[in-house]
Amino acid sequence: MVILRSELTDNINNTPKQCFEFDEWANNGMGIKYSIDCSLLSPTRAATLPPEWWIDSVLSELFTIARSDENRLLMEELNLNEDDFYMEFPERDLNSEESSYLRSIYPANNQPTDIPAFVDYAKSLGF
């Protein structure tokens, strides 16, 4: 969720010849590039919020990461190898019906209240 500024410069005078802003989430996440007056400070418009499918996708992936980390910690705590752990706790397998169900409802139950902060956090994690 950001407006990025770019400039085409005049190589002789090194002054901006043409300036643009890019709204990464406009046009259903495809982004839109706007031509702007180079004398204006950026951003000249409010950034478009990311689509709901992107937020849900990130939340589902965060669930998977958290579940995987929990499983690893439980394996260490119980001193079990992976095969023995999933034989003992088949519902914790990320491909189990229970995990799939929990992953599917996680986004609905954990929608961010501060979307710009959530986007920044998700991007810091590489999403």
Image: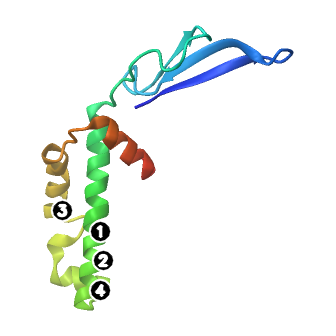
What's the distance in space between the residues labelled 4 and 2, CA to CA?
A: 6 Å
| Point 48% across, 20% down: residue | 43
Percent position of residue 18, x then y: 67, 11
Q: Secondary structure at mark 2?
A: helix
Q: Amino acid at mark 4?
A: Glu
Q: Amino acid at mark 3?
A: Ser
Residue that mark 3 sits on:
99
Q: Image quadrant of residue 96?
A: bottom left
Disc 3 crowd, CA 10 A, few/some/many (<14, 14-19, 20+): some
Residue that mark 1 sits on:
68
What's the distance in space between the residues labelled 2 and 3, CA to CA?
A: 15 Å
The reply to whether callout 4 and callout 1 are in contact (CB within 8 Å) is no
What's the distance in space between the residues labelled 4 and 1, CA to CA?
A: 13 Å
Q: Earlier in the sequence, mark 2 or mark 3?
A: 2
Position above or below: 48 against 115:
above
Residue that mark 2 sits on:
72
- Name of the residue lying farthest toward the bottom: 79
Q: Which mark is residue 31?
A: none
Residue closer to the observer: 93 or 106: 106
Q: Earlier in the sequence, mark 3 or mark 4?
A: 4
Q: Which mark is residue 76?
A: 4
| Point 54% across, 17% down: residue | 41
| Point 75% across, 15% down: residue | 15
Q: Secondary structure at mark 1?
A: helix
Position above or below: 48 against 57:
above
